[in-house]
Image: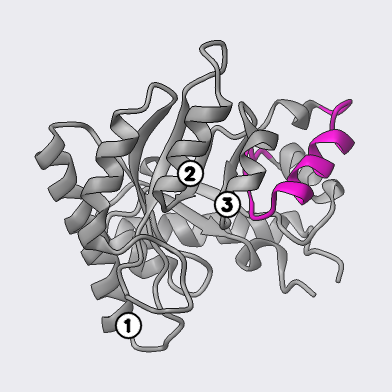
Amino acid sequence: MEPCCDLQHWEAVLEKIAEDCEKSDRDIDELLVLPVTKGFDYQLVRTAWEFGFRTFGENRVAEYLEKRQALSEHPAASANWHMVGHLQSKKVKKIIGEFDLIHSFDRHSLVDEFNRRQTANDPVQKILLQVNISGENSKYGIEPEKAPALLEAVLNSEHLWPVGLMTMAPWTDDKSVIRKTFAGCRTLRDGLAEKFDIALPELSMGMTNDYQIAIKEDATILRLGRLFFGERD
């Protein structure tokens, strides 16, 4: 399916997000609106770059690497990239130094793999702990009660640096369930920051169907794909 590349639509989406922020006594400048380009080819990234986006999200390592190669001669080659999808340990060797931020850090084996693969010359990798606040079996993410141990392991690594948490809300029309999930992530983040006496400023929460609730619960990164680009195949 061809992506939506209607720049007026993109402007309208950003204006709507700004209005939603204002209703929650927040400023859109407090948020990173992260366009997630999975499922679309590199031409979309070029168009989005020319529109003004400078940071993009991807779900799959192979697809990301193909886009980076295709964009090597375009200014978008200097874009920042976030890994927002599930990360397999075997793919770590392919992404050393590639992503500005990994949202989906959810198990100790990833700590071990980064410690094994990274060298002193590689940049320290910023990560978010992905936490399964809702407890759904269908979702990735570490259980909230196990998050402190994982965070401690990350802090003991010379190659990783945590900057916050990520979660996904259940797919439901019940706004109270969604809000409880996001509020739970914020509360957990605040507790971990206090326990370990560190700054964890980022909360990656909210996608196309629930980003307005995420704004109300202090999200700092919104992961938006369909809202900008339309449905994927």
For the point 80% across and 75% down, which residue is it? 233
Chain part drawn in magenta: 52-74
Q: Choose mark 3 or mark 2, whichever is in front.
A: 2
Which mark sits nearer the N-terminus, 1 or 3?
3
Tag 3: amino acid? Leu
Q: CA distance from mark 3 to mark 2?
A: 8 Å
Q: Is 186 on the left or on the right of 111, as rendered?
A: left
Q: Residue most toward the bottom?
A: 173
- Of the numbered discs 3 and 2, the one sitting upstream in the chain is 3
Q: Which of the 4 image quarters holds residue 47?
A: top right
Task: Describe the element under mark 3 as helix, strand or loop.
Answer: loop
Which residue is disc 2 drawn over? 110
Coordinates of residue 228 in the picture (x, y in percent): 65, 61
Q: Residues within 10 Å of mark 1 (few under 14, many from 20)?
A: few
The residue at which mark 1 appears reads as 175
Which residue is at the front of the view, 2 or 87?
87
Quick check: marks 3 and 2 in contact, CB under 8 Å?
Answer: yes
